[in-house]
Amino acid sequence: MQSLRKHPRFIEFVSQAGFFGILFLMFALNKHDESIYWYDGVFFSFYIIIALLIGYVLIPTFFYRKKIWMFWLLIIVTLALVYLVEEYVLEPFLVGGDRGKYVSNIFYTLLGIIPILFMMVGFKLALDSKQKQRELENLQVVIKDSELRFLKSQINPHFLFNNLNNLYSYAIENSEKTPSIILELSSVLRYMLYDCKEDFVPLSKDIEHLKNFTALSELQIEERGNVTFNSEITSEDFCIAPLILTVFVENAFKHSTASQSDNIEIDIQVKVNDKGLLQFSCVNSFLENSNNENLSKGIGLENVKKRLDILYPNVYQLEIDNTNQTYRVELSLQLRSKNNLC
């Protein structure tokens, strides 16, 4: 019974029944003597049948399917039928007296009927509109969820192939750093494969992953520059969308190492206060006469911007600056409580 009360059709039935009850009182008492007669119920029941015919048959079959001319033609035929039944069937046999003997003008009769039908059908249209809005909201949720899954599926192979290529290069050279790279890569892959299945993860896990990823990427630089990573987390009682910050760090290493053979500078700062306000900064050096002219157009950055728009609408600010051989990313983000998300 509890599930039945939540069913859309049951709610629609109860809503219409209540509305029709109020409308019947207005219809029956709208007379000079303000009395309710038994035949008022018969007349009103006839109007309900016509309103249901219009609302559940004519509108879905013709109006919603853009068959406008056919819809209005059938509306005219229906109103004509209503007039004939009321004047030649209901009034003579149910009411009698002078009202049953004389046939009223069609416009006078319909003038009293159309407002009632209009309110009944209008109420049904309002219910349909509310249902369509619910369906649209559910569809938007499904679309967002699908888009997020697609974006995350783009991220994982992106990281994986880049780091496997680096590992291959060190293995070819028989580098002593190969075991360290494998260990760091294992930690990074474990996070991406097992901890990133949800839209949000605990902040502590994502920061730990960011440290591991930075350490893994730092192995590529060797003695060619300096990498600084600082984190100041006042409270870890928050969640964050996985790999958001990692994309910026990954781009910093990729473009710095691609454009410079030495004097590489990468500075990463992460701060989170006790209210969940995250302030992230990633600054890297690069040479302007290299292949970095499309820094802000990479797949990774476009990916993360879309995810921020979906997961953090109106609660983040992203600034990207590319001047004086320095590429700077500043992200301010209001995180959400761990208790509600992860």
Image (cartoon, rainbow, N blue to C red):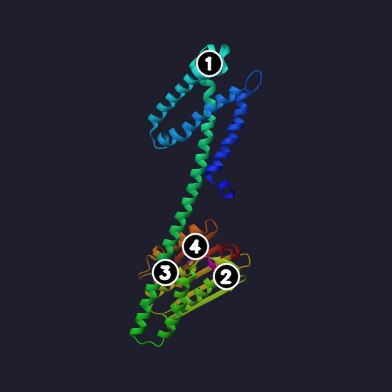
Residue 181 in the magenta stretch? The answer is: no
Per the picture, the main secondary structure of the magenta-coloured stretch is loop
Judging by the rendered image, the residue that carries numbered circle 1 is 92
Foreground disc of the pair 2, 4: 2
Residue type, mark 2 in image: Lys
- Which of disc 1 and disc 2 is earlier in sequence? 1
Identify the magenta region: 197-202
- Looking at the image, which is closer to me, 268 or 235? 235
Please determine whether, in this image, residue 309 is positioned above or below residue 257.
Answer: above
Q: Is residue 101 visible?
A: yes
Please determine whether, in this image, residue 88 is positioned above or below residue 190.
Answer: above
Count residues near mark 4 (Cα–Cα under 10 Å), then give few for <14, some for 14-19, many for 20+: few
Judging by the rendered image, the residue that carries numbered circle 4 is 319
Mark 1 vs mark 4, CA separation in Å: 80 Å
- Which of disc 2 and disc 3 is earlier in sequence? 3
Judging by the rendered image, the residue that carries numbered circle 3 is 156
